[in-house]
Amino acid sequence: MKTFNKSIPVVLLALFAGTAMAQSTTYSLGQLTDIALKNNHVLAIKQLQIEERQAKIKEDEIKRLPMVNVNGSYQYNFNLAEITIPAGTIGVIPLSATNQVPLPNVDKTFTVGKNNMYNAGVTAYQPLSQQAKIKTGVEASKLEVNLTEKEKQKITLQIKHGIEQLYFGILINQKQLAEAQAKLELAKAKLEDVTNALEAGKTIGVNRAGLLASIADEEQNMLKLSYQIQNYKSDLAKLTGINDDNFEVESQVSVLPELPAYATLAGEVSSNPDLQMAQLTKNKAELGIKAAKLSDRPDVGLVAGYVFQSGNPISPMNNPFVGLNLKWNLQDLYTNKQVVKQRSFQLKQAQENILNTQQQLTYDLEKAYRKTVQSKSLIGVAEKALNYRREELKLQEDKQAVGMNLKTDLLTTKALIAKAEADVYAAQLAYILSVSEVKQLIGQ
């Protein structure tokens, strides 16, 4: 027991001395939140995904414009085609009754084409019947951007709430640590009184052993709280991206936020990211059905172009052209029916998801609101207890001034005040966290 009692203060002294010797930075809740949002890699990924999907929108919009293809070719012909016109094919010129000249007078052979052939051209295709489908694709890409933005908003709210939980957890543990310190001082004072009484023969050793056990318990509790604070700071450093977890947090409690009426909060549930994502998923399924139906249409477009060629005397050297192009896969008329069925089931799933999300959100909001109201009522009770303890402390101080009580009586009251202050502090922070949870549910 003696070794245990001696080792714990040494560890506590090392913990506190190490903290005091190091140069620590103090952060407020707002500063930690801003740092976390700036350094979070998941948020950075979501932002890049948003920019990626925005580029996809521009890509889809370009598909509305004409597709222009430029082509060219060169060909060397080792063998050229020949056309032979037999003699007399064109006719006969009767010079006299006995002298007739055939045209041509002998077989004529002509070489067609050239060894070097060149071909260059440009073709433009303007889709006509697919404009509605392209527009639907653009709308679907915009929905993807909105979905990713809502995912980013949800992660942002989760990060803020996580920062608040760790931040207030540190503050609560620090108050509890102060309470444990007051109890430790009280136990040591009682031990001193019992030791003096034991030496005077007024008590037995059992009381001293019990006080030593109480001191060890309080020292152990202080160690646990110190370790818990270190763990909270380590988690906070990881979440914010701070390289060193040797920092302090501002201990001042801000003004307690107001809690709106439940009816007001219920009317703002539509801002919840989960509900908005469920609605966007439904809209995406509807666009999928629309796009599948538009796929039944044939692909009709306007074609225009210009071709230049050299080496083929049969074709014109310069040839501008314009026309219509039709492509229609009749099999799509049957496969698209199944695609529509698939996306109709997706739409029903999205509708069910909306109902489930609304139901779960209503339950969570009622639970969080009830918890917030309870936390607020606990603040009043804890403050009342603290006021009574302060009045008791004043009486004990007056008694000590005239020598009517012991030092342990005053320390007992101070320990009770430390506990009451910790309870008030914990109740206030629990209320702030509950209000934050309510705001998170309504997307704030």
Image (cartoon, rainbow, N blue to C red):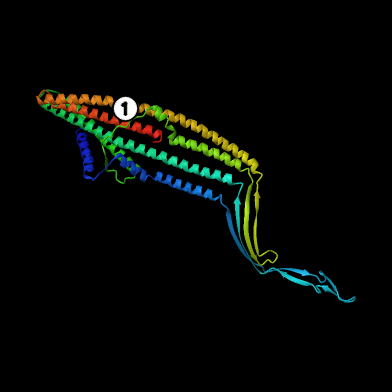
Q: Position of residue 25 (x, y in %)?
A: 26, 44
User: How many C-alpha atoms fall within 10 Å of the one at disc 1: few (<14), some, or many (≥20)?
Assistant: many
Q: Residue furthest right?
A: 97
How many numbered marks does the figure carry? 1
On screen, residue 250 above or below 68: above
Give amino acid for label 1.
Lys
Q: Quadrant of the C terminus?
A: top left
Query: Would you name the residue on which mark 1 appears?
Result: 376
Closest to the observer, 70 or 221: 70
Residue 213 in view of the camera = no
Q: Is residue 278 left or right of residue 37?
A: right
Q: Is residue 113 left or right of residue 283?
A: right
Residue 299 in view of the camera = yes
Q: Quadrant of residue 88?
A: bottom right
Q: Is residue 139 left or right of residue 311?
A: left
Q: Residue at x 65, y 49 (%)?
A: 327
Q: Position of residue 215 (x, y in %)?
A: 20, 30
Per the image, label 1 sits on a secondary structure element best described as helix
Q: Residue at x 31, y 42 (%)?
A: 31
Q: Position of residue 47 (x, y in %)?
A: 42, 46
Q: Quadrant of residue 386?
A: top left
Q: Quadrant of the N terminus?
A: top left
Closest to the observer, 289 or 367: 289
Q: Residue at x 69, y 67 (%)?
A: 313
Q: Residue at x 36, y 38 (%)?
A: 160
Closest to the observer, 263 or 346: 263
Q: Position of residue 158 (x, y in %)?
A: 38, 38
